[in-house]
Amino acid sequence: MGTPMIDDVTLEAVQYIRQETEQGFARQRIAGLEGTLHQKLGRRSHRVLLSGILLPATSSDVLAKLQGKASSGEEVTFTADITTALSVDKMVIESFSAEQTVGAAGQVSYSIALAESPPLPPPAQVSSFGGLGDFGLGDLGFDPGALGDVLGEIAEQAGAVMSAIDTALDAIEQLQGLAGLADLANIGNPIKPITDKVGELSALAPAVDGLMRAVKGLTQ
């Protein structure tokens, strides 16, 4: 058997080594089903438990290295025959313990628990309209790019409508002011302000028409 190693530290006197894999199943009870449904949520990290002793000639140096790696919490490379088929790249030292026997020899024994540390997935790519292109909308007859253009047109038309509405509200306030005048004789042409505001209200028609065309393009 090959000698287990953690980075460049050789563990020459390993006495026990165990590898564990847990699939992470969630048990689900189904009415009328004899047995329990197991739903796979994703495999958990491979774990390796090992213990051994440190050779007297190198025990101080190896112990210091192992303690330093365990204290840092950084990823390590673990190689051993027991993990050959697992394709484990990096691991972390979950726990480390050491014992020194009382006596002239002062032999040091240790126990280490390692867990797989998989690489993080690539960051999510943010695209127009929330990245809907990644969900296969083209297969459903939607063009995400064209959909983004339609939504932009809708936003522009909505802004024009709101501006026209503000103009209409201003016109209503002025008409109410005209209606409240007690003496219309002092107004040179009382109809002219009304006709001016009616002309401004006519700007609503193109904006509403543009909005309806944009919505129609979205739903077709």
Image: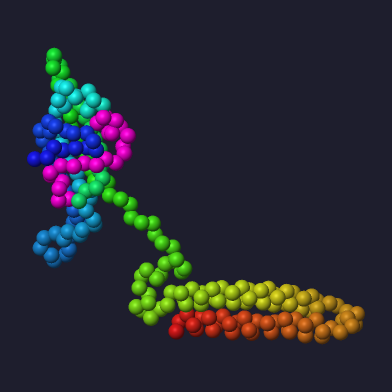
Q: Position of residue 75 (x, y in %)?
A: 29, 41
* Residue at point 14%, 28% (across, down): 53
* Residue at point 26%, 45% (across, down): 90
User: Quarter of the image holding residue 19?
Assistant: top left
Instruction: Farthest residue to the top: give it.
Output: 104
* Residue at point 69%, 84% (across, down): 202
User: Quarter of the image holding residue 158?
Assistant: bottom right
Q: Position of residue 22 (x, y in %)?
A: 18, 50
User: Quarter of the image holding residue 93?
Assistant: top left
Magenta region:
65-86
Horizontal side, residue 195 vs residue 182: left or right: left
* Residue at point 18%, 53% (across, down): 23
Instruction: Farthest residue to the left: give it.
Output: 1
Horizontal side, residue 184 vs residue 149: left or right: right
In this orientation, which residue lies closer to the viewer: 192 or 16? 16
39 vs 9: above or below: below
Q: Position of residue 94 (x, y in %)?
A: 25, 38
Q: Is residue 109 visible?
A: no
205 vs 53: above or below: below
In this orientation, which residue lies closer to the viewer: 4 or 144? 4
Horizontal side, residue 42 vs residue 166: left or right: left
Tell me the quarter of the image containing the N terminus. top left
Tell me the quarter of the image containing the C terminus. bottom left
Q: Position of residue 195 (x, y in %)?
A: 77, 85
Q: Is residue 123 visible?
A: yes
Q: Is residue 38 magenta?
A: no
In this orientation, which residue lies closer to the viewer: 2 or 123? 2
